[in-house]
Amino acid sequence: MNERYENVLRFLRARGGDSLRTAFSYTDDEWTALYVREDVDTPELRRWLATYIENVREHDPVMPTDEYERLGETKATVEVHSEGVLIHFWLADSEGFVISMGSDVAQNLTEFVEQCQRRLHRREDGSHN
C-alpha cells in the first residue's frame, strides 16, 4: 500500500476508531480494498463492490469548478445514509479514494474532510502537493 493511503488510514483509525467501515482506492483501470471492517465484510458487500467502484468512477460533482468557480475546487463528495456516510475524495482525473464510516462522523464533517484531504496530499517528505 502506498504511503499516502497508509497515512490517511492511520488517521482514520485514530480519529474514527470503529466508525471506519471501508476504504478503497481506485484508478481508471483498477481498484483496491485498503480496509474492510470485519462486520461489514459480507458476501453481499463483495458482490456489490464492482458496481460500487464503477458508480464512484462515473460520479460527477454536483457543481463542477469550471462551471461555477465561486465554490472552488471539488475536494470531496459526501453521501449521508441512515447507518453510514460515504466520502469520495478526488485525487486526480482518474484516481480517487472512498471511505465509508458510521453516521456519527457527520457531526463535524467539514473539519474531518479537510484533515483527510491534508493527509492525502502530503508528500513522503511531509510537505504538501
Image: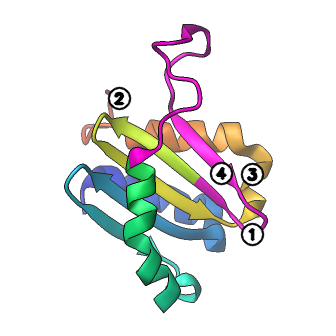
Residue at 31 percent of width and 27 percent of height: 129
- Disc 2: which residue: 128
Is label 1 in a helix, a strand or a loop?
Answer: loop
The disc at residue 79 is 4
- Would residue 101 be counted in the magenta stretch? no
The disc at residue 106 is 3
The disc at residue 83 is 1
Name the kind of residue labelled 3 in the image.
Ala
Mark 3 or mark 2: name the one nearer the start of the chain: 3
**Do the numbered discs 4 and 3 sit on residues whose CB atoms are within 8 Å?**
no
Name the kind of residue labelled 2 in the image.
His
**Mark 3 neighbour class, 10 Å CA radius: few under 14, some 14 to 19, many 20 or more:** some
Residues rendered magenta in the picture: 58-86
Residue at 57 percent of width and 36 percent of height: 114
Where does the image place residue 124, in percent across and percent down from the top left? 25, 42
Where does the image place residue 10, in percent across and percent down from the top left? 46, 61
